[in-house]
Image: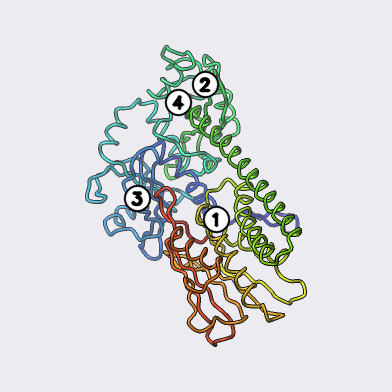
Amino acid sequence: MTSRDNGVCAQPAPAAKDGALLRQVMAALPILADLSRTDLLLYRMSGADQVVVEAQARPNSLSPLYPQLAAGTPATPSVRAEVLKAFAARPWRRHVRTATVQGAPVARELLPIYGHAGRAIAVLGIDTSWLAHERQLRRSIHFRRALHGLQETALRGELAGAEDLAPFGEHDGVMVVDVDMRIRYVSGIAANLYRRLGYAESLVGQHISVLETRDEALALAALHEKRCLEEQATEHDFAWVRKALPFRRRSLGPTFHRLAPGSSRPAGVIVTIHDATEALRREQELKIKSAMIQEIHHRVKNNLQTIASLLRLQARRASDPTVIRLLEESVSRILSVAVVHEFLSQNESAVISIREVGQRILGQTMAGVVDPSKRISLKLQGGNLYLPTQQATVCALVLNELVQNALEHGYDQRDEGLIVVTLRDDGEQVTLLVEDDGEGLPEGFSVAGDGSLGLRIVQTLVEADLKGRFMLENARRAGLGVKATVVFPKSTLGGEGRWNARG
């Protein structure tokens, strides 16, 4: 930032400029790693002759050399010695040496990054397997020069907009265009993609305008705006995703300034092309299916609510208290399932926040079950636990039954009280607690022999569906409340990992 004092604009300090330069370089590393098919490590000095890995980028276009991220770690003694030499090396020139990574020999380049004062402020390490390096040497000289130009452009902090680009994949094509818009290189993948548009002859040496596509406009815009651009366009019934990365070459000047900011001229554009037709088609199909599924859940919810309304109407016309109670319990169970379908109708996610479901169930209970003349409160506590749809549905039924049981049997002779529902994530399992301060359980009580229909339903659901355990016991002091505990393992979804508490 700049500040003004007596009308004079103060310029940013060199250290601030260098920090901004390194941030620009680091933003460009991912796309550079993809296009170069290399692992990139940015080294900085830390203290007296200490070297640390400031940033790292691994390619998406092939298997990386480093199985784990090394950012933030000190450099090994051998790497430290090489990097220190690169910091001090002048004049700047590219040099490939042999190094060892994970016990295998690799090709390594170390390129200094020069700050605004003309001194090296960091070093970029470019590590490539020797096989990939040899393949790169056999590619067109125009491509290699363009790639070197793009790397150097990034090291000067001049590759603006790189952080906004999507990753470059192994099935993406590459084309190199010079400042006169002449095509100098077309990869095999790019040539095959353009054949789909009807361009069967070689494109190398021709003006990019022979392609009646968006390539020329995008390349010109990238050169004019001096920044990387990406766009999606539909041509000949194909959906193309293009990127344009302008690169610059060093201008003549003092040797140590050849990679310094502002010491370059435009040289050309690397254009990448990706056929996104099939991916977009699948995405559209998924959206349609998702919308249909959400609509189905919406209709199921409405149908359940209609059934609940009919049962309520039947309960109002019934005269037998037992019949009325059974109908009201059925209404509550139906609405607890409807809550889950309501969430699914609003959210296409395969997981549901059981906390939100619990809050909705407690709200319904307060509005439709709790006697208004009694001062009974319902409280929900615990983290925002997410569960797959099937487990969430069972949990909704279990929670509803336990709260209903507490209200019916704990406060029959009491006019006030508190029921607390606790959700707890215990790592590999979930714990659901429902605690009340009402009447305790009688001596020798067991769910199997003395429990109500609701408690037996809970036991069946927990053991058969959730594969868990259900315990019902008096609170610490007998006669002053009951504690219901449900513990069950977290379910896997599609065999991939476990759903944990989030947020």
Q: Which amino acid lies under the numbered mark 1 shown in the image of this protein?
A: Thr
Q: Which amino acid lies under the numbered mark 2 shown in the image of this protein?
A: Asp
Of residues 294 and 331, the one nearer the viewer is: 331
N-terminal of the two: label 2 or label 3? 3
Other residues around mark 2 within 10 Å, as few (<14) / some (14–19) / many (≥20): few
Cα gap from disc 4 to disc 1, whole angstroms: 56 Å
Q: Are marks 4 and 1 in contact (CB under 8 Å)?
A: no
User: Seen in the image, is 455 located left or right of residue 307?
Assistant: left
Of residues 354 and 453, the one nearer the viewer is: 453
Q: Disc 2 designates what residue?
A: 180
Cα gap from disc 2 to disc 4, whole angstroms: 11 Å
Q: Disc 4 designates what residue?
A: 176
Q: Quadrant of the N terminus?
A: bottom right
Q: SS of the residue at dot 3? A: helix
Q: Disc 3 designates what residue?
A: 86
User: Seen in the image, is 350 located left or right of residue 144?
Assistant: right
Q: Residue at x 54, y 82 (%)?
A: 442
Q: Are marks 1 and 3 in contact (CB under 8 Å)?
A: no
| Residue 149 position by quadrant | top left
- Up-down: is 267 above or below 154? above
Q: Nearer the viewer, mark 1 or mark 2?
A: 1
Cα gap from disc 1 to disc 3, whole angstroms: 62 Å
Q: Disc 1 designates what residue?
A: 393
Residue 325 at x, y = what percent? 67, 65
N-terminal of the two: label 1 or label 3? 3
- Up-down: is 369 above or below 125? below
N-terminal of the two: label 4 or label 1? 4
Q: Nearer the viewer, mark 1 or mark 3?
A: 1
Q: SS of the residue at dot 2? A: loop
Q: Which amino acid lies under the numbered mark 3 shown in the image of this protein?
A: Ala
Residue 220 at x, y = what percent? 57, 26
Q: Residue at x 59, y 62 (%)?
A: 355
